[in-house]
């Protein structure tokens, strides 16, 4: 597939980065985004962490994703004229002796990304790991403003029933394109890719404040603390696999209890929630619809979007513009 015009559905972090890179290739883009937004990207802590989950596994293709993500966000800092990267130390704290034993079993694999060991009570401490944090919301707002001003942004719901497939490409409500790429996150489960084995989870995040000083480092022991100001921080995140669209915080009391174990005097100023999108094998996915070759998708990043999207977008653009085959463990055809 070689394209000159693309219609991108969803202007979260993935859609923003995809539009940015396609435009650099000379592709004329239009981006469809409904308002008010319900994108998980605006709730994201923006952490780029080489170690993933409670099983202390290396993140997906970490040797590729980590340096690429850093270089892309540094380039965006220059374009945006503002700082979006923070270099808070990232401290992964062990919860119990089993975590310590697991770490020692995996030490050879994890050690390239560990900068120091942290002592703790009864031999349970933690490790400092390489990584960084990205302010995701300013990226989304930057492209929203830019694309609204130049007419790229289409502010309405995507109605897939009004999409028309022609030999020349795609037509949708007065717009034409060579390809449409669905980057709508959990919205993929309701569109033309609803047949995929989707796994959606909801995460609640607390915006907190305390009168006590906050260590300027990210802490993670299954729950994470990310400082935002001298005495303000985010705390999260919960995982819920049901009642995804309920408006109240499903796990507020659980989060508040954990919060006060860390900071007894802290109080909650706001509660945000987002819905993460994954597929059954918990790997990212890119590719075209089996029946509609001009309809493509990109997603499946779960809570690792900040880290994975630059890598996904780079492959998606090479596939769309230069016919470079997608990696087998990323391609939608594996599902």
Image: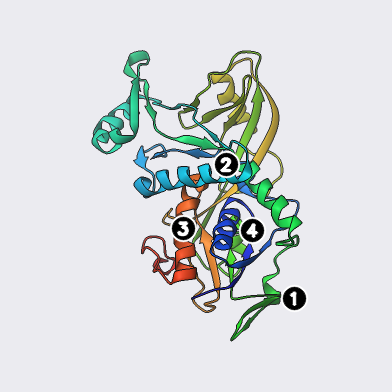
Name the residue beneath numbered marker 1: 174
12 or 302: which is nearer to us?
A: 12
In the picture, the disc for residue 10 is: 4
* Label 2, label 1: how far apart the Cα atoms are: 35 Å
**Tag 1's secondary structure?**
loop
Name the residue beneath numbered marker 2: 77
Residue visible at 68% across and 34% down? Answer: 271
Query: Is residue 238 shown left or right of residue 283?
Result: right
Observer-side mark, 3 or 4, equals 3
For residue 57, above or below residue 23: above
Q: How many marks do you count on the picture? A: 4
Name the residue beneath numbered marker 3: 314
Residue visible at 67% across and 78% down? Answer: 171
Residue visible at 61% across and 13% down? Answer: 212
Query: Is residue 134 shown left or right of residue 63?
Result: right
Observer-side mark, 4 or 1, equals 1
For residue 196, above or below residue 61: below
Quadrant of the drawing holding the C terminus: bottom left
Q: Position of residue 295 (x, y in %)?
A: 56, 73
């Amino acid at each position: 597939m070689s394209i000159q015009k693309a219609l991108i559905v969803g202007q979260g972090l993935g859609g923003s980065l995809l539009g940015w890179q396609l435009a650099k290739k000379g592709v004329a883009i239009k981006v469809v985004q409904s308002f008010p937004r319900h994108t998980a990207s605006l709730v994201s802590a923006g952490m780029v962490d080489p170690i993933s989950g409670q099983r202390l596994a290396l993140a997906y293709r970490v040797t590729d994703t980590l340096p690429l993500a850093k270089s892309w966000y540094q380039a965006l800092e220059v374009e945006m004229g503002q700082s979006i990267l923070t270099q808070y130390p990232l401290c992964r704290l062990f919860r119990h002796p089993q975590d310590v034993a697991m770490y020692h079993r995996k030490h050879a694999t994890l050690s390239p990304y560990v900068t120091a060991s942290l002592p703790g009570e009864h031999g349970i401490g933690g490790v400092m790991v390489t990584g960084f944090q990205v302010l995701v919301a300013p990226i989304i707002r930057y492209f929203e403003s830019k694309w609204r001003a130049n007419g790229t942004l289409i502010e309405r719901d995507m109605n897939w029933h009004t999409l028309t497939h022609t030999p020349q490409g795609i037509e949708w409500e007065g717009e034409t394109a060579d390809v449409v790429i669905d980057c709508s996150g959990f919205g993929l489960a309701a569109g033309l890719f609803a047949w995929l084995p989707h796994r959606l989870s909801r995460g609640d995040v607390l915006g907190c404040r305390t009168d006590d000083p906050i260590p300027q480092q990210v802490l993670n022991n299954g729950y994470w603390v990310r400082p935002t100001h001298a005495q303000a921080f985010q705390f999260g995140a919960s995982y819920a696999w049901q009642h995804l669209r309920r408006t109240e915080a499903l796990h507020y009391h659980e989060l508040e209890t954990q919060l006060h174990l860390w900071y007894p005097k802290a109080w909650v100023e706001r509660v945000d929630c987002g819905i993460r999108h994954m597929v059954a094998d918990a790997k990212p996915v890119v590719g075209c619809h089996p029946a509609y070759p001009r309809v493509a998708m990109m997603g499946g990043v779960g809570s690792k979007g900040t880290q994975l999207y630059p890598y996904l977008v780079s492959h998606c653009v090479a596939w769309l513009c230069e016919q470079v085959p997608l990696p087998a463990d990323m391609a939608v055809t594996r599902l």
